[in-house]
Image: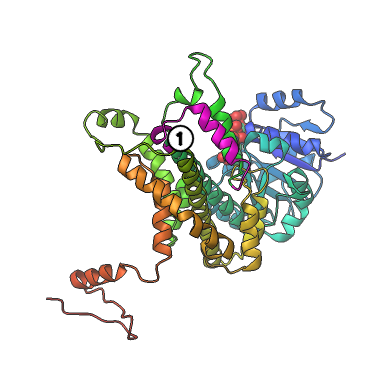
Amino acid sequence: MFNSIGVIGLGVMGSNIALNMASKGEQVAVYNYTRDLTDQLVAKLDGQSLHPYYEIQDFVQSLEAPRKIFLMVTAGKAIDSVITSLLPHLESGDIIMDGGNSHYVDTERRYDELKPKGISYLGVGVSGGEVGALKGPSIMPGGDKDAYEKVAPILTKIAAKVNEEPCCTYIGPKGSGHFVKMVHNGIEYADMQLIAEAYTFLRERLHLEVNEIADIFETWNQGELKSYLIEITAEILRKKDEVTGLPLIDVILDKAGQKGTGKWTSMQAIDNGIPASIITEALFARYISALKEERMNAENILTGPENVGQELDKNEWIDYIRQALYMGKVCAYAQGFTQYKMSSELYGWDLPLKDIALIFRGGCIIRAEFLNVISEAYQEQPNLANLLISPYFAEKVTDYQAGLRKVVCEGIISGISFPCLSSSLNFYDSYRKGISNANILQAQRDYFGAHTYERRDLAGVFHTDWQ
Ligand code: NDP
């Protein structure tokens, strides 16, 4: 009997994806280039539906045609090396899926290299971490649609479900699936940073205890802020350190790591004239956090405001911060979805924005209640220029901007840094203005470089002899 699918790469994600597939009734061939991980995985299951192979040729030959091979290996050179080892054993019509966080440009190159050989290459964004991989991730497959249709029965089966609908949909051609996953991660950076800033306000400005803040996050998670990240933050704040008895959060070193997907999101936005300021601020916040030793030194030299402001009414300000956080999230998601829209037009991908919002509702790290409303906004207006001007969000941000303004102002006065909250407000205030100050920039450019300018009242290109 042949296996219905093969998984290569049995680390954290690959082993759980394989177990997920096996639990859904697939016969899964598993292979890892070092033997130990394969043995560890097979020991977890009775072996009925998980079949280990130790030679790549045996692994490939165990698969039914067209062969469906799911790679879950470290992104970068490892993917190319696995493809090279597979190629001599594959036949035209076989399908390789890359489920890792590959850069979408690499995915497009691999797609182009494999196409003439008759091998279909799908870049499959997977979000949900190790639990999601096991219980049901959000899946973003891109590549040829006919190849997707051959693997769709398996991918939709292993995906998370919301209202019995799978959190997996065909995204578009070539590298679009990995692109959507990349920007998803960029949005995740912004969302996480916004939550960290809300926490900072509650802790440093309202002087609340960690447990009280956990209560607030739990309450928020029952309303329109309901999301996985808010939920886990409440749980994180409850956790005590076994060594000191302190809240664990207080002993965790404040130096943020990153693996590159947020940076790629910002770089793609910068390269293509797409305003992704909130995601980029979140990325820079991680970079600044990494300068721990410098910051410790600077603390002894640089001062903040002397007067940190008056006592604030606790309940009133908890609600302002809730509004600020919600509006910050709306602005961040609005930028992320604009990045999808503008890139889709640029690359001719026709990304299904309504469906992308729907598949983010389950399994993935940025799953959130308000993705339902985001999806509805694109359903009502598929060409919506920006989520902020959809009727629902326009009304929401009209109501909540006062909260965001108060929190950002109070942060500035108190010397607390709010890179993403203030960036959200700046984006909002720039985007809602029909007339900007770029006329000054254009005049300056024309003054020193004869770069010319256009006029508001007359067609054509103008240059002034300024001196
Ligand atoms: P792990 O480090 O746990 O696993 C990586 C796998 O790749 C291992 O099986 C490893 O084998 C294999 N590998 C590494 N180098 C090579 C090579 N040169 N040739 C063949 N195989 C190789 O990583 P994860 O499972 O966490 O991540 C896998 C992919 O999924 C990455 O792209 C990651 O970014 C992405 N991802 C991860 C998520 C997470 O939450 N962890 C979430 C979503 C996506 P060995 O150990 O034997 O070297």
**Quadrant field for ligand 1:** top right
On the image, the x and y values in percent for residue 299 come to 27, 30
Q: Which residue is mark 1?
A: 257
Whether 300 is drawn above or below 467: the answer is above
Which residue lies at the image location 62% right of the left edge and 68% below the top edge? 382
**Residue at screen point 43% across, 59% down:** 428
Q: Is residue 246 above or below residue 89?
A: above
Q: Residue 434 is drawn in which quadrant?
A: bottom left
In depth, the one of 412 and 180 nearer the eye is: 412
Image check: 41 left or right of 246?
Answer: right
What main secondary structure does the magenta stretch of the protein show? helix
Relative to 221, 55 lies left or right: right
Q: Quadrant of residue 217?
A: top right
Color theme of the render: rainbow
Badge 1: residue crowd in 10 Å (few <14, some 14–19, many ≥20): few
Can you say whether 32 is above or below 164 in the image? above
Where residue 320 sits in the image (x, y, percent)? Answer: 47, 46
The boundaries of the magenta stretch are: 201-224
In the foreground, 233 or 392: 392
Residue 29 percent location from the top left of the image: 76, 36
Secondary structure category for the residue under label 1: loop
Q: The N terminus appears in which quarter of the rendering?
A: top right
Amino acid at dot 1: Gly
